[in-house]
Amino acid sequence: MVDNSTVMESGRCTECGARGVDGFSCYDLFGFPLTWEHNNPELYALHFWLVSCYMIQHPSNFTHEGYQLLVRLFTEAYDNDWDTPYILKKNRELVSHVGKIANSTPNELRKRSLKQWSMTIEDIYLGGEEQAISNILKWRERVRSEVTPIDHSD
Ligand SMILES: [Zn+2]
């Protein structure tokens, strides 16, 4: 199982740097857009992008190899402008590997290192439900420009 809990220190997420807003941890903030999606099919269509942006900013949830797999899927989908059904198909393939790509180290023992991102889940939360679609589109663009996939053929 993937344990996605985040660790907050001095009010900030120790991995993505998001500020805890309104008493919510980084992982709590992630729960909001996931709820908004339920009532909005257009927002739900961006589910892959929301989840992958968030996961890419929290590498401690994955093995090193699993993380590279995730970054590769994200960049390929973005660069080749994959349509949603194709992304979902590839995403299912990825999820079927999750047992292997998830970090098995207990949450409290994981190493986390802070990386600065120009946009985090904090911005998605602060923009609220009305801006969620445009913000997630902006977020995926920012994340794409701030990650570098490691090329390895298999
Ligand atoms: Zn975070």
Image (cartoon, helix red, strand yellow):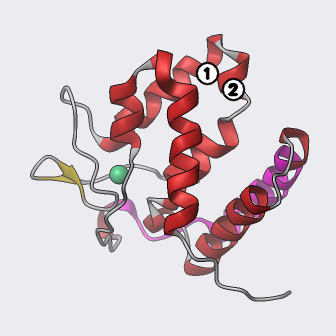
Q: Which residue is mark 1?
A: 37
Left or right: residue 98 versus residue 153 is left
Q: Alpha-carbon neighbours of circle 2 within 10 Å: few (<14), some, or many (≥20)?
A: some
Q: Alpha-carbon neighbours of circle 1 within 10 Å: few (<14), some, or many (≥20)?
A: some
Residue 67 included in the magenta stretch of the image: no
Q: Are marks 1 and 2 in contact (CB under 8 Å)?
A: yes
Residue 19, above or below 81: above
Q: Residue at x 53, y 43 (%)?
A: 138
Left or right: residue 77 versus residue 12 is right
- The quarter holding residue 100 reads bottom right
x and y percentages locating residue 19 in the rendered image: 22, 44
Residue 92 included in the magenta stretch of the image: yes
Foreground of the two, 3 or 75 = 75
The circle on residue 131 is: none
x and y percentages locating residue 146 in the rendered image: 49, 67
Q: Which of marks 2 and 1 precedes in the sequence? A: 1
x and y percentages locating residue 58 in the rendered image: 44, 60
Q: In the picture, which quadrant includes the C terminus?
A: bottom right
State the predominant SS element of the stretch in magenta: helix
Foreground of the two, 56 or 95 = 56
Which residue type carries mark 2?
Tyr
The circle on residue 44 is: 2
